[in-house]
């Protein structure tokens, strides 16, 4: 949608081929329906890629301030919550409507055709591109692929964009696509006993015995594994680790406000002062009762025994669980649960304007590219950045997009 607006504003005649019954459905599910559409803190470290170490050059062309100016030009009010930008209404439908109404306002410059599922692309000798839609076909001077990835297929991003890229038969490199910003499923069956608990902590990801990433925040425990924003942030690496058949583990520190030495000292002092109390009473106020009960069971402690009678080895095991609770990751949840995907068209295949080097009349934007952002409006910013630049440049190069 932003690519269409950008191209039309440059004077191009634009046709939007939408595979579903309406455009922009996926916007409605972003940010839990509130649409955190960008973030004041923005640099290349907020994005991950298998083939690009730095996306700052693209952000320099169309960044946060450009995004805010763009939506302001659509008369959309917005507000900031600690640098996270939302529409003032806190409704994702406001962002969708702003784009939809602008497309309508541009009138004859943009034609929207719904229920037109693109099946194949043909790069023709004169540089134009034929788009096959069932029994119909269209020919354009320039084509922008903004199909989304395989995440949330019910919203329309069913992975067909990768097939469109392959249909060009140009030998383009597509990095393996895996779920990202997604929950992790763990092998430990006992997690059912703490399902539904939310707790502050830090989580580190270990792949093949080596630490890969660390995040902190509210961690959600489920009957099958772990969830929450810190888990989402590390999930793309876990997905690749599982895909490669490596040992993938997460280690949770549920007492992140104290280093291990300080926490051990505190717990030993607590044990000494509360020696006559039962294990159950000793645990009161440490963490959620369900977690304390689980940890005491894992350390072989009885809820009724006096804490002072617990052997040092058992007590040490119990204390360590608060700081280094290790879970083995079985796999990530599937694409249907993922907010975005990692992988996609290699960034080495496109130029500074998102045009394919091997087929320069074809532009690729958004999640189809091998770039995925962290939680916090970064994936939408990548959509705005890539869509706007591609639309603007495509319009300068050709009359029909």
Image (cartoon, helix red, strand yellow):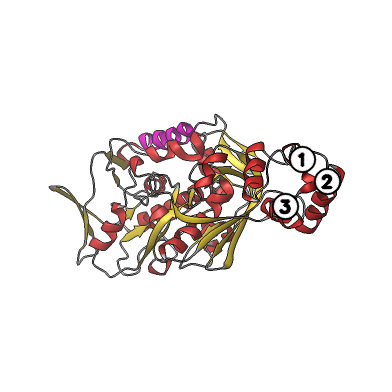
User: Label 1 belongs to which residue?
Assistant: 282
Residue 82 visible, this orientation: no
Span of residues in magenta:
91-105
Q: Are marks 3 and 1 in contact (CB under 8 Å)?
A: no
Q: State the image coordinates of residue 45 (x, y, percent, origin top left).
A: 59, 60
Q: State the image coordinates of residue 201 (x, y, percent, origin top left).
A: 66, 48
Crowding at dot 2, Cα within 10 Å, few <14 / some 14-19 / many 20+, comes out as some
Residue 13 visible, this orientation: yes
Q: Are marks 3 and 2 in contact (CB under 8 Å)?
A: no
Q: Is residue 168 left or right of residue 238?
A: left
The quarter of the rendered structure image containing the N terminus is top left
Residue at image position (38%, 34%) is: 105
User: Label 2 belongs to which residue?
Assistant: 270
Crowding at dot 3, Cα within 10 Å, few <14 / some 14-19 / many 20+, comes out as some
Dot 2 or dot 1, earlier in sequence: 2
* C-alpha distance separating marks 3 and 2: 11 Å
- SS for tag 1? helix
Q: Main secondary structure of the magenta part?
A: helix
- The correct choice, above or below, for 52 with respect to 322 in the image is below
User: Label 3 belongs to which residue?
Assistant: 319
The number of callouts visible is 3
> Residue extending furthest right?
273
Q: Considering depth in this image, is 1 or 236 the residue closer to the camera?
A: 236
């Amino acid at each position: 949608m932003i690519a269409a607006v950008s191209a039309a504003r440059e004077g191009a005649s634009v046709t939007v081929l939408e595979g579903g019954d309406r455009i922009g459905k996926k916007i409605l599910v972003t940010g839990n329906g509130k649409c955190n559409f960008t973030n004041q803190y923005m640099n290349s470290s907020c994005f991950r890629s298998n083939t690009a170490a730095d996306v700052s050059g693209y952000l320099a062309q169309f960044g946060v301030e450009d995004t805010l100016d763009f939506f302001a030009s659509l008369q959309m009010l917005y507000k900031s919550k600690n640098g996270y930008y939302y529409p003032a209404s806190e409704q994702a439908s406001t962002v969708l409507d702003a784009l939809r109404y602008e497309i309508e306002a541009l009138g004859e410059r943009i034609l929207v055709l719904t229920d037109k599922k693109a099946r194949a692309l043909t790069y023709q000798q004169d540089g134009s591109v034929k788009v096959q839609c069932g029994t119909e076909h269209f020919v354009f001077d320039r084509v922008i692929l903004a199909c989304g990835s395989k995440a949330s297929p019910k919203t329309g991003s069913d992975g067909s964009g990768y097939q469109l890229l392959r249909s060009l038969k140009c030998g383009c490199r597509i990095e393996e696509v895996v779920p990202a910003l997604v929950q992790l499923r763990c092998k430990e069956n006992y997690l059912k006993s703490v399902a539904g608990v939310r707790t502050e902590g830090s989580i580190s990801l270990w792949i093949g015995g080596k630490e890969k990433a660390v995040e902190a925040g509210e961690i959600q425990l489920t009957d099958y594994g772990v969830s929450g924003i810190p888990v989402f942030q590390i999930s793309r690496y876990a997905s690749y680790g599982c895909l490669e058949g490596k040992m993938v583990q997460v280690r949770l520190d549920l007492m992140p406000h104290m280093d291990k030495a300080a926490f051990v000292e505190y717990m030993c002092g607590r044990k000494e002062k509360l020696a006559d109390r039962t294990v159950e009473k000793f645990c009161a106020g440490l963490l959620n009762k369900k977690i304390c009960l689980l940890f005491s069971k894992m350390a072989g402690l009885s809820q009724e025994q006096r804490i002072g009678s617990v052997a040092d080895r058992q007590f040490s095991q119990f204390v360590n669980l608060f700081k280094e609770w290790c879970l083995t990751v079985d796999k990530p949840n599937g694409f249907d649960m993922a907010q975005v995907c990692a992988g996609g068209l290699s960034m080495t295949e496109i130029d500074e304007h998102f045009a394919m080097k091997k087929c320069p009349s074809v532009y690729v934007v958004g999640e189809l590219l091998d770039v995925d952002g962290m939680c916090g409006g970064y994936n939408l910013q990548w959509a705005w950045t890539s869509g706007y630049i591609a639309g603007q440049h495509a319009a300068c190069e050709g009359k029909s997009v």
